Image (cartoon, rainbow, N blue to C red):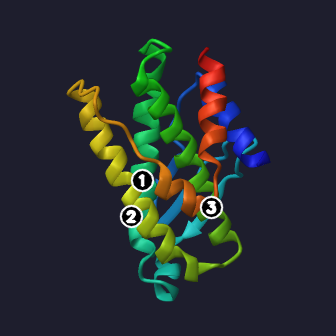
Amino acid sequence: MNILNNILKYVLNNFNNRRILIENGIVTGRLVIAELDSIFEKSLVEILDLKKINPEIGKTSSLIKNLDEYQYIFGNVIPEMDDKNRFKMDMQKSRVYIFYAMTVIINYFKKNQFEKIDAWNTNVNNFLEKISEFYVDYRNNDLDKKINFDDISTYLGVDDDFINKTIEQYYN
């Protein structure tokens, strides 16, 4: 729960939005993720070498790139929104899950748990599809749509109710 608290603190209190991906692993063959306060350390992964162990690592790089893109977009939009805006709440929750998913994949890399990458790819890809649809709904101002975080919450083992309560308390 400590890492989740750190992520929530970062997402809710950090107004210096930035990308966390330094090298995306697609162009250079190296995946470099910047340090994120007390959440994770700077990480370097030699993608070309890992593709020999698990060919799905290329997809992992692409998913990480997309996670970073959405957290950055949401981080730029959130400060301009009213605190009671439903989209703001879901964008903040999305950022929490994005950073948590990043901690999981970084740990898999560090611990050489490459057999877990396929499940991470599948679950994160499904989550990214939901985020993408949500972002389109936001851009179209479709207030009836909402992200369902159940699948990603279950996969990551994160207490969605705790995230909801923490974000709601922050904005109330």
Which one is closest to the eye, mark 2 or mark 1?
1
> For residue 65, which numbered disc appears in the image?
1
Which one is closest to the eye, mark 1 or mark 3?
3
Query: Which residue is more in the foreground, 37 or 156?
Result: 156
Residue type at mark 1: give it.
Answer: Lys
Indicate whether 67 appears above or below 119: above
Residue displayed at 40% across by 72% down: 58
Query: Does the residue at mark 2 contact the one at mark 1 (Cβ under 8 Å)?
Result: yes
Marks 2 and 1, how far apart in space?
Answer: 9 Å
Residue type at mark 2: give it.
Answer: Ile
* Residue 69 horizontal/vertical position (percent): 40, 43
Determine which residue is flagged by label 3: 104
Indicate whether 5 appears above or below 144: below
* Residue 124 horizontal/vertical position (percent): 45, 60
Residue displayed at 41% across by 54% down: 127
Determine which residue is flagged by label 2: 26
Is residue 37 visible to the viewer in this orientation of the structure? no
Q: Secondary structure at mark 3?
A: helix
User: Can you say which quadrant of the picture contains the C terminus?
Assistant: top right
Marks 1 and 3, how far apart in space?
Answer: 15 Å
Query: Which residue is more in the foreground, 73 or 135?
Result: 135
Q: Residues within 10 Å of mark 3 (few under 14, many from 20)?
A: some
First in sequence: mark 1 vs mark 3: 1
